[in-house]
Amino acid sequence: MDMELGMELVLEANFPMCECNNCFMGSFLQMMRYKGVRLSELEVQLPYAGVRLSLSYQDGISLSANFIQGIHYFCSENQIAYKTGEILPQHIGEVAYEILSEHGAFMISLNSRDYGYYKAFVNDGIQHCALVTGVDKEGLHIVDACASSSQPTTHKGILPFENILEIGQHQPIPIAYIEGEVTWDKKEKEVNWVQAKKNHIEENIKLEQGSRLRTGLDYCEYLYSDLSLLRGFELRKISHNIMTDTHVPQLKMLINLFADKKQQDYYIKMNQLCNDWTLMSYRFLKGSFEYDFADQETLVYNYKALLEREREIYQL
């Protein structure tokens, strides 16, 4: 990727990297730090969009979390100019320089195969988001707030242009950035956490449409409808979904609602539930590599049981 002489820019950061359980949310929170604002994923997500799931009908039915919706709603409510677009891959270096110069760090969504350090599920070509903080003749300087799906870690380094498959494939690359300055007064934006938590618990106990548990149970019914499809890559997709998009990331965020000493029982039970979802993800992954795998019904039964256990915790 040829770049004009002098078109190199790397943003300095005198703050620590944030660690997050979802790559899109993590990139957004890190981008906000470059704008001088420190937020938690729960502050962005729960009061503005809730912690919900939806059914996606692209390439078969799958579950999807609403982290991106949370980002959009948060920015809309707080007059933050969050802009989305695409980069033509043949101009990635020049356009990255322009965005960094005008707007600062920006989010980029690439094929997981592009990231040499991102080993889990990398061969499945999953979309993965990171924050671009610089560009030079070697490639993009990135910060990844969710670099591993097995244990949340961060990564900071250079993503070489030759690693970016979209360039050779001429595929548009999705990006997002914040236009202008961000003013944020934490006291002025005080969140009613008691009410937000109450709303979340009630909608899941009542299994309201769009709630985590109602949508998850609907998804189980779909899986039960044709268990023969659950093998190989399909099992691996569910494993990835549990670990990096839906149950583990959402629960790790929700656990913080029960962190005070008066709610230790809730906290312990939610933490164990999260650990069991992690084990469930590994079981789906293991099954995906078993040639004669024939335990689909047990997997779905256990998946449903974890959803029902979460509802029981909320009813305590």
Image: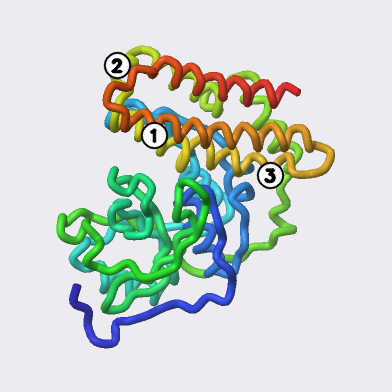
Kind of residue at badge 1: Leu
Kind of residue at badge 2: Ser
Of residues 315 and 234, the one nearer the viewer is 234
Q: Is residue 140 visible?
A: yes
Kind of residue at badge 3: Asn
Report the disc number at residue 228: 2
Could you say where residue 271 lies in the image, as x and y percent from the top left?
Answer: 65, 37
Report the disc number at residue 285: 1
Mark closer to the observer (2, 3) = 2
Query: Residue at position x 38%, y 74% from top?
Result: 134
Cα distance between the residues tagged 3 and 1: 28 Å
Cα distance between the residues tagged 2 and 3: 38 Å
Please identify the quarter of the rendering in which residue 99 is found.
Answer: bottom left
Of residues 98 and 168, the one nearer the viewer is 168
Could you say where residue 180 lies in the image, as x and y percent from the top left?
Answer: 48, 69
Mark closer to the observer (1, 2) = 1
Cα distance between the residues tagged 1 and 2: 16 Å
Left or right relative to 290: residue 11: right
Say which label, 1 or 2, has the lower sequence index: 2
Query: Residue at position x 53%, y 48% from top?
Result: 21
Say which label, 2 or 3, has the lower sequence index: 2
Report the disc number at residue 256: 3
Q: Is residue 81 visible?
A: no
Name of the residue lying farthest toward the bottom? 6
The reply to whether discs 2 and 3 touch (Cβ–Cβ < 8 Å) is no
Say which label, 3 or 1, has the lower sequence index: 3
Q: Is residue 106 above or below residue 211?
A: below
Left or right relative to 227: residue 275: right
Please identify the quarter of the rendering in which residue 121 is found.
Answer: top left
Please tell me whether mark 3 sits on a helix, a strand or a loop.
helix
